[in-house]
Image (tube, rainbow, N blue to C red):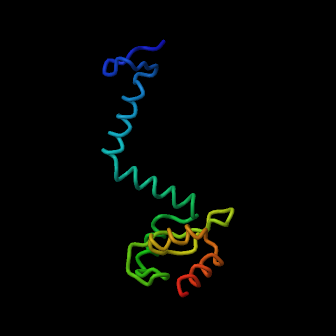
Amino acid sequence: MRVPCKKHPGEQYRNGRCRPCAQQRARDWQRENNEWHNGITRRSYFRCTYGLEAEEIQAKMLEQKVCPICLEERPLVVDHDHNQNEPGWRGFICRECNLGLGHFRDDPDNLIRAAAYLVQ
């Protein structure tokens, strides 16, 4: 049996909360448990996506301080290979270079043609 929500009269619920109330409760929980929630999410993301523990990645990022493409000292991100069927990563590069590689679809031929175009 559906019951109207007291806070949101147009909403009905079955399990004790209407949708807006349930969403607000989830947001409040995430805000209160932000550090724990982000740590768990980050760990499982790195483990599932790259097959590495977050601590391993963090340690490797701290060792490398310069982007190997632009040679600038910027915050680094994980560069992963889109052409692999299984999780895989190539290394660490800055966000700008990572986006650039993505725009060239990780294709070396596209990058060579772009470089030739720039030196014309």
Q: Farthest residue toward the bottom?
A: 119
- Relative horizontal placement of residue 44, taking residue 38 as reference (left or right): right
Task: Give above or below for 10 relative to 117.
Answer: above
- Relative horizontal placement of residue 65, taking residue 86 as reference (left or right): left
Q: Nearer the viewer, residue 55 or 24?
A: 24
| Residue 13 found in image quarter | top left
| Residue 47 found in image quarter | bottom right
- Residue at image location 42% in from the left, 82% down from the top: 66
Q: Farthest residue toward the right?
A: 85
- Residue at image location 43% in from the left, 80% down from the top: 63
| Residue 87 found in image quarter | bottom right
Q: Farthest residue toward the front?
A: 120
Residue 52 image offset from top left, x and y in percent: 54, 66
Task: Give above or below for 19 relative to 65.
Answer: above
Residue 96 image offset from top left, x and y in percent: 45, 71
- Residue at image location 51% in from the left, 57% down from the top: 45
Count of numbered badges drawn on the protein: 0
Q: Nearer the viewer, residue 112 or 68?
A: 112
Residue 107 image offset from top left, x and y in percent: 64, 73
- Relative horizontal placement of residue 112, taking residue 37 as reference (left or right): right
User: Which quadrant, please, contains the C terminus?
Assistant: bottom right
Residue 41 image offset from top left, x and y in percent: 46, 53
